[in-house]
Every structure is written in structure tokens, then in C-alpha cells.
Amino acid sequence: MSDLAPALGQIAVLVAALAVAVPLLGRHLAHVYTSPRHLAVERTAYRLLRVDPDADQHWKTYTMSVLGFSLVSLLLLYLLGRVQEHLPLSLGYAALPADGAWNTAVSFVTNTNWQWYAGESTVGHLFQMSGLTVQNFVSAAVGMAVAAAFARGLARQLAGGRVGNFWSDLVRGVLRVLLPISVVSAVVLVAGGAIQNLMGTRTVETLAGGTQQVTGGPVASQEVIKQLGTNGGGFYNVNAAHPFENPTPLTDVLLIFLMLVIPFAMAWAFGLIVRDRRQGIAVLSVMALLLGVAVTLLTWAEMAGVGRAPEAAGGAMEGKEVRFGEAASALFAAATTGTSTGAVNSMHDSLTAPGGGVAMFGMMLGEIAPGGVGSGLYGMLMLAIVTVFLCGLMVGRTPEYLGRKIGQREIVLVALYVLATPVLVLVGIAIAITAQDGLAGLQESGPHGLSEALYAVTSAANNNGSAFGGLTSGTPFWNTLLGLLMLLGRFVPMVLVLALAGRFASQRHSPPSAGTLPTHQPLFVALLSGVALVVVGLTYVPVLALGPIAESLS
Amino acid sequence: MNAIANLNLAQALPGAVRKLDPRELVRAPVLLVVEIGAVATTVLSVADPSTMGWIVTVWLWLTVLFGTLAESVAEGRGKAQAASLRALQQETVAHKVHGSFDQLRYTGNLAELPVDEVPSTALRAGDVVVVAAGDRIPGDGDVIEGVASVDESAVTGESAPVIRESGGDRSAVTGGTVVLSDRIVVRITSDPGRSFVDRMIALVEGSERQRTPNELALNVLLSSLTAIFVVVVGSLYFVADYSDAHQSLIVLTALLVCLIPTTIGALLSAIGIAGMDRLVRRNVLAMSGRAVEAAGDVDVLLLDKTGTITHGNRQAAELLPLTGVAQDELAQASLLSSLADETPEGRSIVALVDGFETGAERLPQPPGELVPFSATTRMSGIDTGNVSIRKGADSAVAKWVHSTGGHATDELDAIVERIGASGGTPLVVAERRGLQPARVLGVVHLKDIVKDGIRERFDEMRAMGIRTVMITGDNPRTAAAIAREAGVDDFLAEATPEDKMALIRREQEGGRMVAMCGDGTNDAPALAQADVGVAMNTGTTAAKEAGNMVDLDSDPTKLIDVVEIGKQLLITRGALTTFSVANDVAKYFAILPAMFVVAFPDLGVLNVMRLSSPESAIVSAVVFNALIIIALIPLSLRGVRYRPSSAAALLRRNLLIYGVGGLVAPFVGIKLLDLVISLIPGL
């Protein structure tokens, strides 16, 4: 019982902090993505980018802007990695190999932050700061922009497919949301004990008499944005388990808070943008419900120490930091896989089998509980549309969501969206475990080996970026495969979301009546949660059965 | 089981077998995947025969067949009706007037012009024909001269003949119907093969059935679910190999067929055909399936007051004697003055007074000289001996009273005012004895009688989220009173066709879908503009062309039925989709442990149904999957039971039955099948 009190305590603190912050930030976000006014510093940015921030873009133009911007980011980051040895502050590290630079460039541009390398021993400060940290900001802002465009598409009618301006969404997302919160949080984090300097590696003698390489660097600044932007790529290889990144249980709660606050607030902002707060709250409730279930299951699995090895060891502490313990590790794991963050404060490979299954299922849900910044919201809304379509017919009307009729063209886009990620994951896993190069990366055989590979492809296709460990992924095979999964897993859904936003923005809005399916009531919240679980369950249960489920039962 | 026995499966079988042609099945991708699977298992079973292989193969073929059978059965129901309609199309001899309508437009007395005898199939739009009593009308058209009674029973099923006359709103005639009396001249409006009956035949047979928007959308969703499961099962092949739990292609095909939404995939088109059929059974012809679906989406119903909300005519509702006049006295005077009055109002007064105990005897003939209604006096009445009785509008009667030296009282004005305010029409009755001044006896309150039960239907509509708007030519005050009494949400008084059109446009601009019915030519633009426009069969050709449905019974109240049928169609689709997807959960519990229990004995705990053997489990799931299609054919043809209520209530109810039911039913069904199938030797 004594273990349970702090476990519940940290959750209570987190819930309280979110309850205060989400409505405030939600209101701010709604304002950011709808206000016609520009700040002076933003105008300068627009002049530098040579864009017109007041142009109301057609969804196709918006999409081209998203893709063009991301392509340029991708090329720049790739180049930066390839010429690292010639850059200042490189700490003497060599250039990244072609496949590695590709993987890393895709990984950070897609907000995935899958890391095949150990940060402190592969990349220098300049690459970390001007490459990775910049992408941590802008890739997050891109996700938020797409979600905002989708919300605006649902809020408008007869707007001829115009969904807003990408450049202003991008700039505002960085300047008005991500930067201010990051600066404040970084200061708090440093106060909590994280480091922030530009020092290189130094060798220290340990108490035991051995020597150890200790790398300093601009850790706190990258730490906060990697959490806030649900990026997840750590400064150090062990990510938020490293004491320089995440020194105390208090900073741990702060980091979890940062992961969750924007995804939840986006749902709140969505309600405000579509001028029906209850809709936002309903979406938020589903996110919270699913996350709650994941936290409960994971915490139970870890604290009970389910499985042969933990039972033999008297607890599931393998791969966990003693300063956090089981409950804080479980909470972090649920939050990082529920959002598309992928940061870790424990090694997921060492989670108990059911715990690892829950973490994997969280990602398989498509990162909707509460999901990545922006991507969580639009992913959930896509599922809401599926739900409306499946169940809406049962009230005897053409299915509609927020007054938008879901006809053939709309459902084609939604169906492709729902299809995209599972196809990537399942084709990916089939390739990975069939190819010799793929199998070579697996540490274990049998169900656990399958879990390692499955976790990797799921994490990549869903843009999560957390790793199960055990998988040696820094090979050309894995770098290429996972890079492709990340790229397609990010931009195929985005294009579909924006196309749907355009469709909605050109439709006429039909007002709700007693005959329309209410999408803000508890019944719909339960329904949407159920559809999410069933659709994802039916897709992944067979592979899960041979991986984590088989492992859990043995 | 009785319901299934009634389906005439044997008759539908040949059609079902023909539909197995893959080119036909492209329209139903789910079934096509099953068929491909069946071909694959057939080949595999031939190459490597096994009991299980053959059983699975047979049941996969049956699954496809049951799917095509459902469609075939649904189509079969329209076939009989089509046959009787075809009888109408037998070739007849037409008496064609020389020249086209354009040339004859200003010629009078067309019936006397010389005619050619031509076969009815040779007639083209624009030809003019003469049809005499006993003749079959050779083609669809409008009466341009004369009036006749016509037997339309072959089309409408209504045996009473109807009047068809030139001009006005009852000019349209349908080819194949028979003129019973008189002679009419008809301008043909359709070319051969494109007549109303042709369209009816195509509709009831389903041969020209175009899939509706929602059906297409649902098909997309079902196809994408199918695609997901193809990928799931495909990847499972490799994953199973990796896990040393190699799966035979037969087992994987069985799993695939069980997972893809075969139930709804097989029944989808049957549901659509049956929905149209339900309308046809109520004598409503939808010109497109799109209109039926749109009916389910309707937000606003425009209803004509007369005939829909009220019985067409004003009726006497009460007698209001002035002070000093006995009720009986007024009743008797009203009765006497109305005996000669053949208008519906007059008859209703007689009917009302008959309910009273008056001293007046029922006389076979009016006891005196009748004074008919005239436009100048605006009164009618009777003169018996030395007593004159007059009834009419209050101003007219007051004038008469004054002319005899009498005077109207303030009390009368008050009553008249009150009746007017309530939406009724006051009819003042006065009497003059001898040469005395006439005196007013009282007032007959004529009112529009709102149909019984109409208020409850509007309450239902409101619960369904549908707003009802009454359209009337009455003045706003009268309209408001009737609207209040009938319980409609809104009304449009002194409505002109332009007003109606403007109202429809306004509602549509607000994103609402509008349904209306109409019959006249001046209704045609509004009928065309409305999302659902039901034209009365008695109406003009223009109205019938403009609407997207025709009501053969010409009953405007049916608009409400049409909405309910539209909703029922969509609900049936949604319910069976939910049922189909929910079924998958149980199938996983049956098949997955069966597949992997050899490699991972621990997965045996997932075999919650305790199925006897892996082979039996897989076969049971496949058999269940096929039988559920047959079991649900009656439901898909009948439609899910529908009671008007709010969306939230409907959702709760249907979710409980088809969602939860869909989760539970296969657990029970598969277990029961397993008990039988496990007895098969060699499995």
C-alpha cells in the first residue's frame, strides 16, 4: 500500500496541473490559430520568408507549403549530418553515414525522433542545436498547423476549400506557443538540476576507481522542447533516464506534464475554433479515458511485476531508474506512447510483457491518447468521423460530424487515413522479420524478438520514436526501412487530413437538430473510445497475439 | 425460420448463381474477395485434399452464394409487380390526329378532326391522340380537350375511377390506363420505352438500380476494412512463419473471410432494393434511390394544409345561438336552410344538426322554396310559407336584416369576431316571419377540421428533429389558429408558389433539407427545388416530372411515411454494419487460439468458448459467418423496426441490439455449431 500512495500522488499532481493549464492554453491556442493580427517580430519573419501571411490558402496550396517546407528541412538536416566533421562545435565526431543521416533527418522532420545513434557520442552541439532542436520546434509547429487547419475547415462553410495560412500557423506556433513555454520550462528544469552548457566530453574518475566519459551540453533547452513538442529525441542515448536530462522525480512530473499539455489543449482549442466547446471536451474526454486506461494497466503491470523474471526478481525494476521506481516509469511510458513523444525514462524492452504490450497498443491506437501535438487531435477526429459513419447511420440520417455530411468523397479520405498506418506497420513487420538484414538486428528470438521488431516499426510508422531496446537499428536496412515508415507515416495522413479539411471547408453546414447524432454526449465518448479500441484491436491482435500476448501468457 | 421459408429461395437461386460471375461481383468487393478465397481454397483442396479443406471450400462458396441470393431474393419481390405492369404495355391501336401539337395548338374541337390508326408503339412525344370510352390510353400525356373518367387501377391499385380533364391540375394520364366514359384528346408526352410505366418496371425490378450516395460511401468503408484485413492476414503469414507457427493458406483464407465484413457486404444491395420496394408497396414511386436516402435526411417538411393537415373542407363545428334564441330553434333553422345546400359546408351542417334532438322532422324534400346561393346576395336559404330563413357571411346577412327593418346586435359582432380570431368562418343564420323585421338567430361556426392523430404525428416528427411547416392560402390569422391546433412548428399563410419557392431556398441556404408534396403545374419549380418532392399522381405531368417521387394514391400525408422509410433504410444499413464488425471480436477468439495453440500452448486460455478442436473452431466460425447472412436476409428485406424518436434514443436502442448483440451472438452461435461440427469424422 505504501507504494501506491506516491503512485497516485504523482498522478493527482499531474491531473491537477493539467486541469488548470489545458483550458488556459487551449484558449490561447484557439486565439493563435484564428486571430487576424500579427506581431511585429512575426512580420519580420514573413518578410524574410517572403510569404504573405494574410493569404487564405486553398488546401492544396496549404499542403504544398507543408510538404515544401518539410522537404527543405529534410534536405538541410541531411546535409548538416553529412558534413558534421567540418562544422564547429562538432566535438570531433565524424560525419553521419548516408543511411544514418537519412534516418535522422526524416526522424526529426517527421516529429518522430527515432534515434539509431547515441546522441552524446555521435552528434556534436551544433547539429544538436541548429539541426535537431530547431526541428523539434518546427516539426511540432507543422503538426499543430495541420490540426489547426483541419479545425478551421470544420468551422467554416462555403469557403471554397480554403483552410488558412500555413506560414502564419507555423510562425505563430513557434513564437507564440512553443518558444515561451520552452524558455520558462527550461529555466525551471535547470533549477530542478538539469544541465545547460556547451562543454564537451570530459573523463572523470568514478568512486569505484574506473573512468567514465561525461558529456555536457545544452541539455535542458533541448529537453523541454523534445517533451513539449512530443518529439522525444534525447540529448543522451538513455534519454530522460539520464540524470542530466531528468534529475529528480519532480522534474519527471514536469516532463510528463510538458508532453501532455499541448495535445490536450489542442482538443480544447478545437472546441473553441468550431464554436462548440462541448465538442472539444468530448474529444478531450476520449483522449483522457484511453490514456487513463493505459496508465492504469501499465502501472498495475509494472507494480505487480507480472511475468516470470520480475516474479523471480521480486519486482520489475530491471531497466528502470531507482530514483523513479515502477510507478513513475509506468506513468512516463504510458504518456510517451500515448502521445507521439517517444522519450523514455526507463527501458521499454524491460517493461513487463503486458506493460510492453500496453505501450505498443498506445502507439497502435495511432497516437490519439492524447497523441502528438496536432497529430493527436486530427487522428482522433478522423476516428470520430469513422465512428459517426459506423454508428450515425443507426439514427437514420446520412452520417454527419459537426454538421458536415460524410459522403463518399469524405469517407474515401478517412478510409485511406485509417488504412495508411496499419498497412505501413504490417507490411513493415512482414519485411523486417523476413529479411535476413532485419532479423540480424533483433537481440532475442521468439515472441520477444517479434515484440522488438514490432515495437520499432510501430514506433516509426506512428511517428512515436520511442525504442524498445534490444534492437540494433543503426544498420542500413533498419535505417532505410524505418526512415520510409516515418516519412510515409507522417505525410500521407497529413495530406489526407488537409484534403478532408478542404472538403469540409467547401461544404455547407447543416444545423444540428434532435434528429442528428449528438457528438458531445457521454454515449458518443464511450462509442468513440470503443471504436478506437475495436478498430485498432482487430487490426493488430493477430501480431500482438504472437508477440506480447504469447509472451505474457507464458 | 418461417420468415426464411417465405423468401422463395428456390425461385431466386438461378439468379443468385448467375450473379457469381466475378464481373458482376466487382460491385460488391467484399463478396469478390470471398469468391477469390473460395477459388483459392478449391485449388488447394484439389491439390492436397483434406476434410477440413473441403468443408471450408464448400462453405466459402456458400458464403458467396448466400450473398448473391440475398440480392436475388430482394429483386424477386419486384418481379411479380413488374409482370403486371408489363401487361399494360401491350400494343394498342391509337387514333392519332394529323399534325403535331404545335400545329394543332390553336385548333378547336380536336376530337372531330380526322385520325389515323397507328400502333401505340409508334407514338412520339408531341403527337395528339383521341381516346374514346373503352379505349386504352396509348401513352403518357396530358388531356388537352375534354373530360373523362379513367380507370387507373392497374397502376395505382385503386379501383375507383378518377376524373381526368383538360386544364387545371388533373390533366395527366398514364399510358395503359382505360377511359371509362366520354372522350378526351391527349397530347403524348413521352417517347416509347421512356414512359412512366417503363420507369416503374425498371424501378420495381431493380434492373436500373443505381447505387445511392450513402450506399457507395458505405461500400468504400467496407472495402477499406476488407483491405485492412487482407493486409492483416497477409502479414500474419510471415509473422507466423517467424514464430514457427506456420499457417496453411486454407486457414488464413478462412480467417480472412471471417474478418472481412461479409454480413453487411452481402446484404448491402438487398437492403437498398428492399427499401425501394417498401416505398412501392405503399404506392410511392421513387424516381431514384438518392431521393429515398434524402428522405431520411429531411429537416423540414412543407405540408399543404388542405388534405394533409385538415380534411379538405370547412365543416360545421358548433352552433352559437344569440341570447333569447333556443339552441333547437337555431338548429332547426340551420337544418332547413341547408337541406338544399349541396356544398360540403351545407352537408356538414346537416350532419352536425343530426346529432341534436331537434323537433324538425327529417323530410325527404325541403318543405318550401329553395333560395340557392348567389354571388350577388352571398346567402342561401329557404322560404316556407311565411317564414324565410337565410344563412351566409355576416355582412351579407346583416344587410338583409337591415333591409327588412331589423338590426344586428353587438352580441353578434362579438361572436363573429371571436370565431374569426380562432381561425374559423362564421355563418350567420337569420329568420323572418311574415312581414316582421328579420332577426338574427345565431351563428354556425365553420372550421377546418384537423385530422385525427395528425398532432401526434407532428410530435413524432419533432422528436425526430424534423420541423413541420404548414402551407396555406388562408390569411395569417386563420393559418395561425390551425397551425396551433394541429401542432405544426411554423406556417406560411397566403402562400403563393413564389413564396413556397423562396421558403425552400431559405431553408436550403441554412443547410437544411426540405421535403414537400404538390400536384399543380405551379408547384413544379418548388418540387424540383426541394430535396424530396413528392408529386401526386392526380397532378399534372409537369409536377410529376419535377418531383423525384410520385404518390400513386395522391395522399399528401404519405410524405411522413416516406421520411420514415428513408430513415429505416439508413438505420438497417447502419445496424447490420455494426453487427457485422462487432461479430469479428468473437471470431478472433475462435480462430486465433486455434491457429496458434500448437506453437504457443499458452494461447489456449484465449479459447474462451472451449471449442473442441482447432479444426472444428475454424470451420464453426466459417459456417457461422455464412449462416448469419441467410439468417439476416429477412431483416434486411423487412428493415429494422423503427419507432420515431430522437437520435440519441435511437442510437442507444440500436447500439444495444445490434452492437452488443453483434458482440454476443457469434460466441453463442459458434459454440453451438462447434458442438455439431466436432462430430464430423476426420476433422
Image (cartoon, coloured by chain):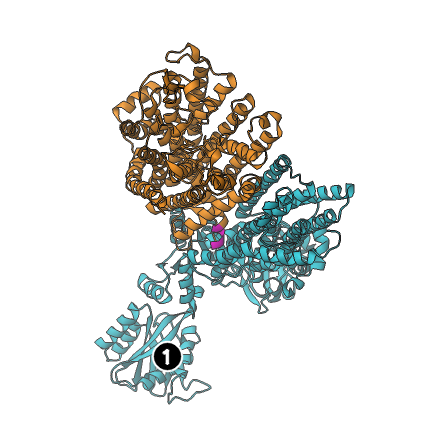
Q: Is residue A241 left or right of residue B20?
A: left
Q: Which residue is rendered at x = 72% and y = 57% of the image?
A: B679
Q: Which chain is orange?
A: A
Q: What type of secondary structure mainly makes up the magenta span?
A: helix
In this orientation, which residue lies closer to the viewer: A380 or B5? A380
Chain B colour as displayed: cyan
- Badge 1: how crowded within 10 Å, few (<14), some, or many (20+)? many
Q: Is residue B519 magenta?
A: no
Name the spot of residue B335 as percent of width and height, x first.
Answer: 38, 82
- Residues in magenta, as a range: A391-395
Q: Which residue is rendered at x = 45% and y = 85% of the image?
A: B365
Q: Amino acid at mark 1?
A: Gly
**Quarter assignment of residue B434:** bottom left
In this orientation, which residue lies closer to the viewer: B245 or A443? A443
Name the spot of residue B310 as percent of width and height, x first.
Answer: 41, 67
Residue indicated by mark 1 = B381
SS of the residue under disc 1? strand
Q: Is residue A393 magenta?
A: yes
